[in-house]
Every structure is written in structure tokens, then in C-alpha cells.
Image (cartoon, rainbow, N blue to C red):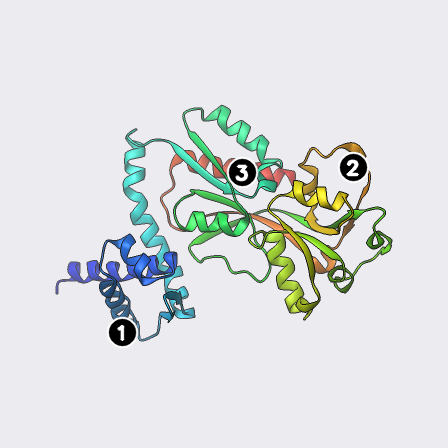
Amino acid sequence: MTAATSREVRFRQIRALFEIARHGTFAAASRSLGMATPSVWRQVRALEDDYGVQLVTAKGHDVRLTEDGERLLDLAAPLVEGFDSLKKVFHDQHGKAERHLRMAAPATVLNSSLRHVIARYRESHPQVRLSLIDAPSRIAWQLLEAEKADLAIVGTPQGVTLPTRFEATPLVRYPFEVVCLASHPFAQIKAPKLRDIVKQPLILAGENSSSRMQFDHLVAKAGLSDQVNVIMTAGNVTSILNYVALGMGVAILSRPATEALPVPADVKARFIHRNVSSFLGHDQVALLHPKGRHELAHVRAFREMVVKGLKEEA
């Protein structure tokens, strides 16, 4: 086998590992690669033999990377991303590619100061077709991982490890608050603790949101999961606040989540906010983009505007 052939084989093996990490099953990875499933399996096994470590584990149809697999992928991802994006960048520089930007982010981010960044970008880049995808944080980074988005702006909760393929640029962080009616019994607790919160009827965001992931992690860490009383899970802040306004329970949100909504003044006056960042922490918002990918000029311009705009807000 020549050196060139050896490099080509190694690249196919690395790509097989890359697609398994991306799709989570040998079958899905094989469809993405246009190969038979046994061939993908052999590529990974050959890579394991070469490196002398186990790179993947299988449970039923699901396949996950081991710690060594994640480490190798972290090193190799820029190589794969760079190669895959090369043709697109080449065509873009020759004016042959459509200028399209897909950005995934939760509604609370889209409805915050990011609106002003988007407005400025549209004004300065009218030739770019901008697609904004409203998605909770976990779904947003999954869209980025599946190459259905070019960028993602998400909360990065404690206890959750982002895919190693991503470069994360911290933007802003907002303290978590408990929101309830001024007439609710919880409002009388001036310095609430985590145990006080879990005793309340809770109206929380969905399990793919950064606030919910962080709350669930910290409650589990404190050994209080069996005491949590979630009476409602909602996909948007409007629904959460509507039911808080009915006195049904208390919510855990960041301040921008509530400020971004056109809540009637008489309703807003009935809410109280308790800063609980001392034990629930902050909603750390970050911009994600794939490591090593050759970045199109219009994508880079938007990313730079976001970083500048949101950091200025902080």
C-alpha cells in the first residue's frame, strides 16, 4: 500500500468515526456515507486496532464514542470539517454558491438584543438569505451537528458536555430567577434555597432548554430529584408566564426571557422576581460553530457581529 493510499484509507476510517458520533448508529452512519453497515463497522474496528484502544461502545442499535473515541474525534474533527467545507468556500469565492445563513437559537435569544444584530446584518448583507430557526438549546446544537444550521446560539448548562466538534464563544450570562405572583406563598420567602423551590408547584421550560437542563442537573446533584413537583412543562415563555399569572405555580427563568415579552403592565406588576443565581447559577449563552470548518465570508461576518453586539450588551 502506497503512502497516498494509506492516508486515503485512514481518512475514510476517521470519517466513519465522525459520522457515527454525528448519527449515533452504524446504520445511520452507513446511509450518510453511502456504504454498507458492515463496511462502516470494519472501518472503525481497523481504526481501533491501529490506535490500540476502544473507540465506540454499542448498546442495542445505539453507538456512543468512548472517552478515547471523543479524544480522537476532537483532534480529527477540524480535518474532516475543513475538507468537507473546502468546495463550498471555493464556489463561494467564485460567486457560484448561494449565500444562505441558517442560525438556530432559542426564542428567548431571538427575542432579546439579538434582534438588533439581525436587523443590522440584514441591512449590511441584503444578498444573504437568512433563515432563523427557533429551537431550544439542545435541539439547536443538534441541528448544528447534523449540518442543518451554520451557527447556533445556545445556553450551555452545567453538567452537560457539548459535542467536541464545536467551538464555543461565550457571549453573555444571565442570572436565573424564580418568578411568581406577589400573592403566592413563595413570595414571602425572601432568601429562598433550592429545597424551598422544589417544594413548590413548578412551571418549567421543556427538557431540551438550557434552564431545564441546568435545573435538573443541580437538583439531581443535591439529591432532591424525587421531591420535584413539575405541574406543567411549556415550550415557550408566554405559556409559562400565563400560568404563573393564574397562580398555579412558580417558574425558573432568566430575566431576558421575561423582558423580551410584551406582557401587559398590570400583569407584570403582579410578578415578583427572586434572584437564585447563588445556587442555580447563570444561563451562560454561547455561540457555537464547527471546529476547523472553512467559514464562508457571510457566515463569519454574522458571527463577528453577534459576538460584538452581545458582548457590548454584557
Question: Badge 3 is on which residue?
Answer: 306
The amino acid marked with disc number 1 is Asp
Q: Secondary structure at mark 1?
A: helix
Where 10 falls versus 295 (above or below)? below
Q: Measure how far apart labels 2 and 3 are at the Cα level.
A: 32 Å
Question: Badge 2 is on which residue?
Answer: 267
The amino acid marked with disc number 2 is Val
Name which residue lies at 67% across and 64% down.
219
Name which residue lies at 49% across and 50% down.
139
Where 279 falls versus 267 (above or below)? below
- Residue sticking out furthest to the bottom: 52
Q: Measure how far apart labels 1 and 3 are at the Cα level.
A: 44 Å
Would you say 128 lies left or right of 109 here?
left
Pointer 2 with pointer 3, Cβ within 8 A: no
Would you say 209 lies left or right of 226 here?
left
Name which residue lies at 46% across and 43% down.
151
Question: Badge 1 is on which residue?
Answer: 49
Q: Measure how far apart labels 2 and 1 are at the Cα level.
A: 64 Å
- Residue sticking out furthest to the left: 1
The amino acid marked with disc number 3 is Val
Q: Is residue 103 visible?
A: yes
Label 2 vs label 1, nearer the camera: 2
Quadrant containing the C terminus is: top right
The crowd level at tag 2 (other Cα within 10 Å; few <14, some 14-19, many 20+) is few
Label 2 vs label 3, nearer the camera: 2
